[in-house]
Image (cartoon, helix red, strand yellow):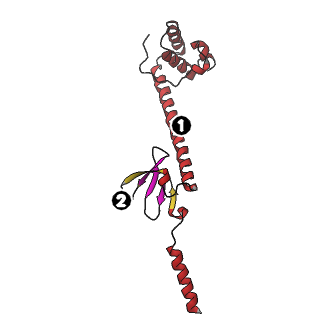
């Protein structure tokens, strides 16, 4: 009887060890990649949510369509893609915020030597002369940032509808007037 039980347990262990791992056991979501624990391959999304870059253990890379991944259609791939999209949006928002801050700093430096009154006079002259609207908006944006005028007054001063105002503009060099 003991021999029969030992044989049965041994057979079941051999059978269990011979079973292939499930997708959830074989592929792990680690940080910004999915790792194949058996082969060491790493699956990453880089430029598109349609294609994975597979980095093999030997360092070689290949690009494969999403549909050809062994974990396609599982919650693993869905979670990974959703997190990738969220991360991408966060990076875009951060880059946009950094760009806006850089534009504000450049504008502040450009007009540092002017008082609020001098800037307003410069704007009024430019507006009267129908100067480039980008430059006019740049001056108004600096006055708004300084608190010399309010956001609500800006469209009236520029004589444009509020939806046409964009204070996050990049200009090369303002004309000296």
Question: Label 2: how many residues lie within 10 Å, few (<14), some (14-19) or many (20+)?
Answer: few
Task: Tell whether position 34 is magenta.
Answer: yes
1 and 2 marks in contact (CB < 8 Å): no
In the depicted view, which residue is nearer to us: 141 or 171?
A: 171
Q: SS of the residue at dot 2?
A: loop
Number of marks in picture? 2
Residue at (51, 75) in percent of width and height: 17
- Write down the region rendered in magenta: 33-54
Q: Earlier in the sequence, mark 1 or mark 2?
A: 2
Q: Is residue 162 above or below residue 121?
A: below
Point out which mark residue 58 bears. Answer: 2
Q: Estimate how packed mark 1 is, as few (under 14), some (14 to 19) or many (20 or more) residues with alpha carbons within 10 Å.
A: few
Extreme-right residue of the structure: 152
| Of residues 166 and 67, the one drawn nearer to the viewer in this rendering | 67
User: 59 left or right of 136?
Assistant: left
- Position in image of residue 124 (x %, y %): 53, 9
Query: Residue at (52%, 67%) from the top-left corner?
Result: 21
Q: Can you say whether 1 is above or below 67 in the image?
A: below
User: Which corner quadrant holds the C terminus?
Assistant: top left
Residue 127, above or below 28: above
Q: Which mark is residue 145?
A: none
**Residue 151 in magenta stretch:** no
Residue 10 on image: x %, y %: 53, 83
Q: Position of residue 109 (x, y in %)?
A: 46, 23
Q: Is residue 166 above or below residue 1?
A: above
Q: Looking at the figure, which quarter contains the N terminus?
A: bottom right
Residue that badge 1 annotates = 93
């Amino acid at each position: 009887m003991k021999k029969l039980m030992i044989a049965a347990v041994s057979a079941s262990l051999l059978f269990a060890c011979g079973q292939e791992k499930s997708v959830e056991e074989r592929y792990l979501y680690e940080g910004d990649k999915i790792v194949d624990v058996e082969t060491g391959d790493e699956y990453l999304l880089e430029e598109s949510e349609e294609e994975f870059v597979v980095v093999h253990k030997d360092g070689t890379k290949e690009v494969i369509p999403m549909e050809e991944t062994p974990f396609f259609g599982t919650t693993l791939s869905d979670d990974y893609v959703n997190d990738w999209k969220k991360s991408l949006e966060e990076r875009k928002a951060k880059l946009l915020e950094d760009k806006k801050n850089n534009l504000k700093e450049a504008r502040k430096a450009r007009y540092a030597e002017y008082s609020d009154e001098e800037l307003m006079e410069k704007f009024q002259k430019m507006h009267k002369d129908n100067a480039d609207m980008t430059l006019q908006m740049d001056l108004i944006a600096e006055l708004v940032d300084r608190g010399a005028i309010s956001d609500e007054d800006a469209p009236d001063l520029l004589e444009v509808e509020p939806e046409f105002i964009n204070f996050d503009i990049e200009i090369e060099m303002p004309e000296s007037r």
